[in-house]
Image (cartoon, rainbow, N blue to C red):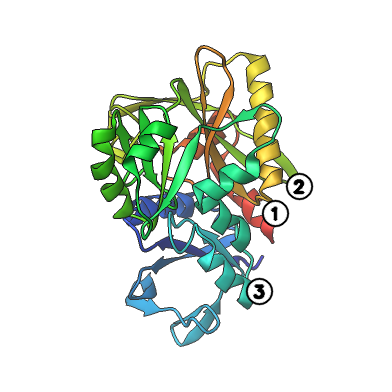
Amino acid sequence: MKTKNIALCAGGFTGEYEVSINSAKNIAANLNPEKYTVYTILINRDRWFYESANGPVDVDKSDFSIILNGAKVKFDFAFITIHGTPGEDGKLQGYLDMLGIPYNTCDATTSAITMNKAYTKALVEGIHGLHTARSTRLFRDDMHDVAGIAATLKFPLFVKANNGGSSVGMSKVHNAAGLPDALKKAFHEDDQVLVEEFIQGREFSRGVARLDGKIVVLPASEIISKTEFFDYEAKYTAGASEEITPADLPTEKNDEIAEILTEIYLRLNCKGMVRIDFILPEATGDFYFIEVNTTPGQSDASLIPQQVRAAGMDLSEFYGALVEGAL
């Protein structure tokens, strides 16, 4: 049987480059070699290339192909695992759409929208059972009225890049005096910044995927950070956080959350696999939406692989279903 050529797109233009490389290694190890021939395509600002046994081979961007041993290799499918731009914000998806190459993620429009935290919150408002923290969005070129923010929103506040990932540039601010430095840090990452009220509660993350034509909600993971909040350090430093999969939640609450997550997936026109982060305040148990991640981490220890295993599924089967579903 002839295998399908898979371009496993990794790297990207952000500080999450190495995270993406680790994701790609685990995906490559779990794509069935009897069905797929995997070529890891590294994408950075200067170059797109495949690291062959004889050295790097540049990608021909006119048709997304490479030349190996004198023969052109064209790809049947692109498996995108770039965290941040250009693989999470719709840019790479738009390019692949123009070439007619299918891929595993949300389309260009949904990818672009969900990368923008403020736009995403506006779109999911009104879903039954879903709540969002009060917030304000700031633009780099605007005047930043610290006193106005302090008077409008209740401390503590999270200040974060509106289009960022992995909590890069995020700060937790306890009073007005801390806002200027937090804004400067966030604007270093993005031209838009979201200032959001802190919601005290248990933090969770849960994958949602369309498999064999059906929307499947994976078991929840609870994240217990040993730092003040689940920032980049807590996510990627061994021992800085504890992740419990499956999370300890009553069956009724699990089912209620699954319904909300399914509605989010449909409302945003998601495709393939996404991960949705949320908080459950201990006092009320209400669902507070945080964000949607359309290219979640896929290293062996990442949340989605944990959840796939907790659901009794095989990673190879899971990734294969994503490929076949998109094809």
Q: Is residue 249 above or below residue 307?
A: above
**Which residue is label 3 attached to?**
100
Marks 2 and 1 in Cβ contact (< 8 Å): yes
Q: CA distance from mark 3 to mark 1?
A: 16 Å
Q: Which mark is residue 325?
A: 1
Circle 2: element type = loop
Residue located beneath label 2 in the image = 213
Amino acid type at circle 2 is Gly
Asked which secondary structure carries label 1, the reply is helix
Identify residue type, mark 1.
Answer: Gly
| Residue type pointed to by label 3 | Gly
- In the image shown, does 66 or 194 lie closer to the viewer? 194
**Distance CA(mark 3)–CA(mark 2):** 21 Å
Q: Where does the N terminus fall, quadrant-wise?
A: bottom right
Which residue is drawn at the image coordinates 60% and 33% (left, top)? 218
Picture quarter containing residue 166? top left
Q: Residue 249: where, in percent of width, then height?
A: 57, 16
The residue that appears at 51% across and 67% down in the rendered structure is 91
Q: Is residue 294 visible?
A: no
Closer to the observer: label 3 or label 1? 3
Q: Is residue 298 above or below residue 107?
A: above
**The C terminus: image quadrant:** bottom right
Going from N to C along the chain, the mark reached first, 2 or 1, is 2
Q: CA distance from mark 2 to mark 1?
A: 7 Å
**Residue 109 image point, x, y percent:** 62, 60
Q: Of the residues under marks 3 and 2, which one precedes in the sequence? A: 3
Q: How many dots with numbers?
A: 3
